[in-house]
Structures are given as C-alpha cells and as structure tokens.
Amino acid sequence: MFASAFTLAFLPLLAVASPQIYGPAPGPAPATSAQAAAAAPSAPPSTSGQINIDVAPGGNFVFSPANVTASNGTLITFFFPDVAGVSHSITQGDFSNPCQPIAAQNGQNGFDSGLQAGTQFTLNVTNDQIPIYYFCKFPTHCGLGMVGSINAPSTGNTFDAWMSAALKVGSSEQTLQDNGPQTGGIGAVATATPAATASGSAGSSGSSGSSGSSGAMALTASSAMAAVFGLGVAMTLLA
C-alpha cells in the first residue's frame, strides 16, 4: 500500500524530472512580418557631413527622413531592412515624370541602387544647387508615396509636390525592370554598389537567454529526482 501511495503521490514530480518522456517543450512562436520589420537594423544618427536614412522603417513605404538638405561633399547613406520577400530601391527620378528613372544628362545616367534588402547604399552630393529626387521602383511602392528628395526647394518643385505627383500615379505606376545597381548620378553620385549591412548582436543575446533557461530546467529536474529518491529511501526504512 505504501508503495502504491508513494507512486501516486510523486507521479507529478517524475513528470517534471523527466520532461523528455512527454516530448520537448513547445518552441517559440514564429515572428510575424511586423516583428521582422521592427527587428531590421535602423540607420545610426546622422553626423556632420554624414546623413543616414532609413528605408521603409517599421515596414512602412517611406524614407526617414524623406527630405534632406546637404552641401557638397556630404555623404548620404540609405539603410535597407533585411526582411524576407521585401526589397526596395533608391532610384533617381525626374520631377516632371514621377516614378520613372531620370533621363541621362550630358552622358550621365542617374543613380540606382537596384532592388535591395539588408544592404546600405551611399551617395556623395556633388552639386547642392540642384534638387535631387528619388523613389523606390519596386512595383506599386512609388505610387504609394515611397519617394524622397535632396535639396528640394521650399517653393515650386518641393518635396510635398513630388510626393503628390507620385501619389497621383497611384496604381497606374509602370513596372520597371531591375538591372541591378547603377553607379554615377546627377547632382549626387554613387561611387560604389550597395554593401551588406552588419547584423546586430541580438542573436547571440537570444542564444544566451535560451541556454540559461535550459540550465534552469535541468537544475529543477535534478532537484526533483533527488527529492523523489530521498523520500523513497526514507519510506523504505520506516516500513
């Protein structure tokens, strides 16, 4: 009788001590697309002579900041999020023809990062006396207002007017072929193709946390087994 009572009383402890009998603990829920977008690396703060711009922060079809003023020699770096199935571009456009690449001028084409994810793309401002307009050429993005400007005037062809022109294109936006990165540019020059953005240390931190949790579970299981064994010996001696 004592053996039966002992077994029934300590079945829960045995279950805790030997979780592998009941299968592994459920893993973490997969991250949602919103969480993945939020986890994408953000552009660092801008400094003197260096402007950093987030591409599609938080999964929104915008650039942040979308309108900047930069003198000659200023470097402007765009940081693309690394989200599966989503890519964007920095394609130089023409105010009079929104959502279309700018035509070559004096033999010089506009800059184009090509469709990218998880990279960064840098422009060097070479003529701060002319406005520079750009957009994302991924289908429908420009028509949704994913545009930006550098040194846009405060009247006339302003950033707001550029945005309005893109929104008017809307769903009638023409699909553009992606031929990859294109260096050069008019008013601002890309001297190199996009480079991979260094990943953060969140992965190692998460691994450390998981390891600690596993250690705690192992310690709990060992303690429970010790308690079961000790009580079993004591009851045997009393019998």
Image: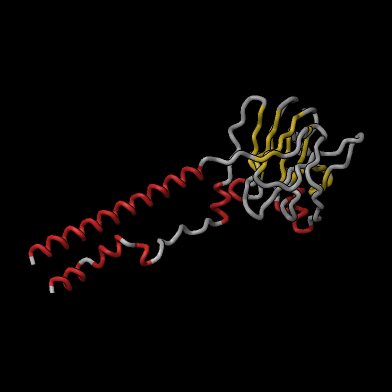
Q: Say whether residue 11 is left or right of residue 52.
A: left
x and y, in percent, of residue 38 in the image: 55, 48
Q: Is residue 165 visible?
A: yes
Name the side, left or right, on which 207 lies relative to 69: left
> Residue at (76%, 53%) from the top-left corner?
168
| Residue closest to the eye, 211 or 180 | 211
Between 200 and 157, the one nearer to me in the picture? 200
Classify residue 41 as left or right of residue 235: right
- Across and down, in percent, residue 56 comes to 64, 47
Q: Position of residue 35 (x, y in %)?
A: 54, 52
**Residue that appears at 79% across and 58% down:** 172
Query: The C terminus is located in which quarter?
Result: bottom left
**Count of marks, rendered view:** 0
Query: Residue 3's spot in the image, x, y percent?
Result: 16, 71
Residue occupying image coordinates x 83% and y 39%: 110
Residue that protrudes farthest toward the right in the picture: 106
Query: In the displayed image of the protein, which residue is found farthest to the left?
Result: 238
Would you say residue 164 is visible in this rendering? no
Colour convention of the picture: secondary structure
- Between 44 and 96, which is closer to the camera in this rendering? 44
Query: Quadrant location of the N terminus?
Result: bottom left
- Looking at the image, residue 72 lies above or below residue 66: above
**Which quarter of the picture shows residue 154?**
top right
Looking at the image, which residue is at 76% across and 49% down?
137
